[in-house]
Image: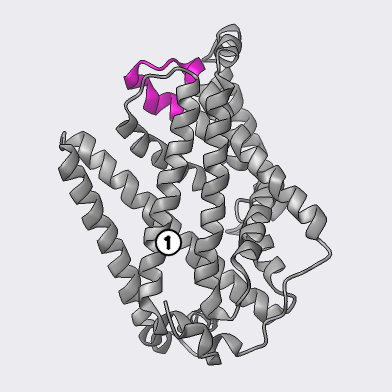
């Protein structure tokens, strides 16, 4: 009998192999001397500015997570969520799977099994709104480029798509009880959906989270564009608003470790029409990765000094019964 799923160690080995293979493939198509000279030409002031934007984006993402976690019973301060978010970034770099950081965020938010399950639900909600905003941003800019839309039309299209995504989230959480009724009582999905019921009392919160996510995604684009400016790349600003989201969406796929190779290969392909050499694109990808590493190391420092203090426990049922936690948006 053939097993449909691979052992975690086998999956990790495949990702290591894919990472090495992608790296080798890219190195065969660039000149190392040119790659080095491109890196030496970097104006590091732009990279540090891009790093500052990335750090700010992660802090705002922590605020978004706080808004989504509080209805589930996690009434902690926003800074505590921001710190946990930074910790998650560190473990996303260190652990073999892309969801490792999300697991640690949920684990650190509570010290009970039920509390960690609820924390995991908040992390999933956070991820879904982020992916929705990323898709809206990529779809808008691709349509604008394909149909040569003027600026006002691009803005109008993005607004419509973002509003549509927010509306779909509102309708989905507003119908949670119907989804739960349609799932068999003993099915694991029923328990998971039941943990999300507090969102049904606050459907506008999910819509707001989509808008928060758009701020996060735009900030991420700006951060990469600033690093590219340091390399002297003359790519129109609007182009970055589909290049970065498309590369980011590709990096979500469980192909390589931390998106290494996927990030650089995507940039090579998407930047070629703008006259950007493979060496310049790969260098930009490496600097983008370096930004992620620095942000992750900051999270590692936070974890090092805070590892002895797990998040407070969440009592079973508190996320559903606490009227104070769901009284306002």
| Quadrant assignment, res 160 | bottom left
Residue 249 higher or lower than 110, as above or below: above
- Please give the name of the residue rendered at 50% of the width and 70% of the height, measured from the top-left corner: 68
Foreground: 325 or 23? Answer: 325
Left or right side of 322 for 110: right
Classed neighbour count for the residue bearing mark 1: other residues with Cα under 10 Å, few (<14), some (14–19), many (≥20): many
Regarding residue 100, the answer to whether it shows in the image is no
Residue beneath disc 1: 129
**Magenta-highlighted stretch: main secondary structure?**
helix
Left or right side of 152 for 302: right
Foreground: 285 or 265? Answer: 285
State the SS at label 1: helix
**The N terminus is located in which quarter?**
bottom right
Residue 230 higher or lower than 151, as above or below: above
Residue stretch rendered in magenta on the structure:
267-280
- Residue 198 appears at what percent x and percent y? 47, 83
Single out the residue that lies furthest toward the top.
33
């Amino acid at each position: 009998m053939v097993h449909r799923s691979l052992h975690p160690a086998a999956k990790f080995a495949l990702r290591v192999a894919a990472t090495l293979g992608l790296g080798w493939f890219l190195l065969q198509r660039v000149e190392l001397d040119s790659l080095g000279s491109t890196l030496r030409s970097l104006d590091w002031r732009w990279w540090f500015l891009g790093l500052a934007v990335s750090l700010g984006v992660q802090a705002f993402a922590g605020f978004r997570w706080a808004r989504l976690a509080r209805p589930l019973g996690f009434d902690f301060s926003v800074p505590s969520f921001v710190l946990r978010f930074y910790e998650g970034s560190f473990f996303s770099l260190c652990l073999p799977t892309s969801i490792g950081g999300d697991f640690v965020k949920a684990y650190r938010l509570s010290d009970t099994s039920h509390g960690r399950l609820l924390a995991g639900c908040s992390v999933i909600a956070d991820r879904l709104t982020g992916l929705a905003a990323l898709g809206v941003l990529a779809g808008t800019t691709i349509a604008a480029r394909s149909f040569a839309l003027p600026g006002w039309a691009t803005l109008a299209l993005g607004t419509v798509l973002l509003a549509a995504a927010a509306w779909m989230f509102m309708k989905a959480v507003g119908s949670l009880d119907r989804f739960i009724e349609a799932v068999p009582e003993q099915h694991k999905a029923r328990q998971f959906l039941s943990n999300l019921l507090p969102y049904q009392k606050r459907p506008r919160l999910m819509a707001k989270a989509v808008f928060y996510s758009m701020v996060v995604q735009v900030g991420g684009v700006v951060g990469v564009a600033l690093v590219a400016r340091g390399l002297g790349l003359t790519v129109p600003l609007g182009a970055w608003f589909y290049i970065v989201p498309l590369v980011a969406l590709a990096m979500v796929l469980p192909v390589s470790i931390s998106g290494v190779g996927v990030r650089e290969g995507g940039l090579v392909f998407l930047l070629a029409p703008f006259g950007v050499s493979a060496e310049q694109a790969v260098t930009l990808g490496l600097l983008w990765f370096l930004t992620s590493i620095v942000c992750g190391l900051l999270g590692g420092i936070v974890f090092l000094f805070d590892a002895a203090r797990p998040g407070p426990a969440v009592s079973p049922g508190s996320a559903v019964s606490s009227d104070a936690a769901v009284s306002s948006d």
